[in-house]
Image (cartoon, grey):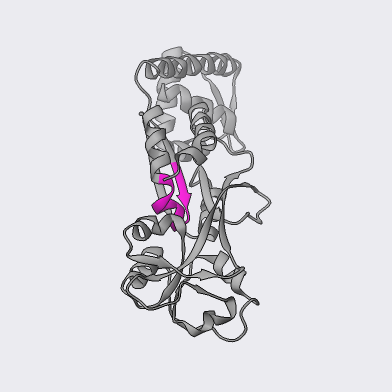
Amino acid sequence: MEALKIFLDIAALKSISKAAQRSHITQSALSQQLKSWETALGTELLHRSNKGAHLTEAGIIAEKYAAQICKLYDDMVTEIRHLKPCRHSLSIYAIPEVCNYALPCTLYEVKKHFPQCNISLIEGSSAVIEEHILLEDGDIGFICGPSSRPELNSYKVFSDKVMLVTSSSTLYPEEISLSELSRYPLIWPAQLGCVQKAIHGAVNGELNILYSLDSIEAVKLAAVKGHGAAFLPYMSIKKELYGKQLKVIHIRDFQIYNDVYMIKKQNQRCDHETKQLLRYIEKTLIDTLC
């Protein structure tokens, strides 16, 4: 089979050296293999010259049957593989708050319906996720806000309220105005771009930001420890609010929502099983989020 496939490469490329490069073997080894086949058939299959390699009349016949044999062989291998349970892979990229708090329950349901699927969930920033989806390193991505990249399809899948919280042990008021926000020390969530957009231009003067952290978990831990107040997505603090480790500071007439969008590459290349998986996730996502 390898000899037939190499012969078809030579016929297509019209070059023994290029076919050898494609097959990662030396040109001399390929020539010897081809010569052995010609000896077995009792005829030359190629005219060799400085301009390349061209099929003889016998070579044209050999090419026709070699192509049919290779196709039949590939069909045989495919049919045999279909006798076994096939494992498919699904690669998902998501911003931290979605990766850590929203999707695990959805993926649990996916595994129940598609037990042979291998699922990987990778955390990243919105910009990094877009790059991975464009390069087809991932099948789908979840980012903050819509994508501005024309090569990507994006649509809103859900919104999560962002709350200002602090440790239940601190003596912060239950409600403040937006103008009073600068009085209180803040641990800033660097990855929550929606907070920056919502507050930019709405607050007079400088905010009292103690430090900025990339990790949602790190921001939450600092808030639980009483280091300051923090803006955090509701899905990331449900447990701490229920357990009274954190309390909400309401801001009068002001709300922030983290809009989560799912992105896919336009004209994405994927097999039938992957398409089924993606359709299932899109259909059940809202009902299965943690």
Viewer-nearest residue: 82 or 116: 116
Q: Which residues are magenta?
A: 91-103
Q: Does the magenta run of residues contain 102?
A: yes
Q: Is residue 50 visible?
A: yes
Q: Nearer the viewer, residue 64 or 224?
A: 224
Q: Which one is in front, 118 or 107? A: 107
Q: Nearer the viewer, residue 50 or 196?
A: 196
Q: Quadrant of the N terminus?
A: top left
Which residue is depicted at the point 55% across and 60% down? 127
Instruction: Tell me if residue 88 comes above or below residue 101 in the rendering.
Output: above
In the rendered view, does 53 fall on the left or right side of 273? right
Image spot of residue 92 (x, y percent):
46, 45
Regarding residue 53, the answer to whether it shows in the image is: no
Q: Relative to 44, is 104 above or below?
A: below
Image coordinates of residue 130 in percent, x first then y, are: 56, 54
Give how far across and how far down residue 241 sits, in percent.
Answer: 37, 60
Residue extending farthest to the front is 174
Question: Measured along the vertical axis of the image, is residue 274 above or below residue 251?
Answer: above
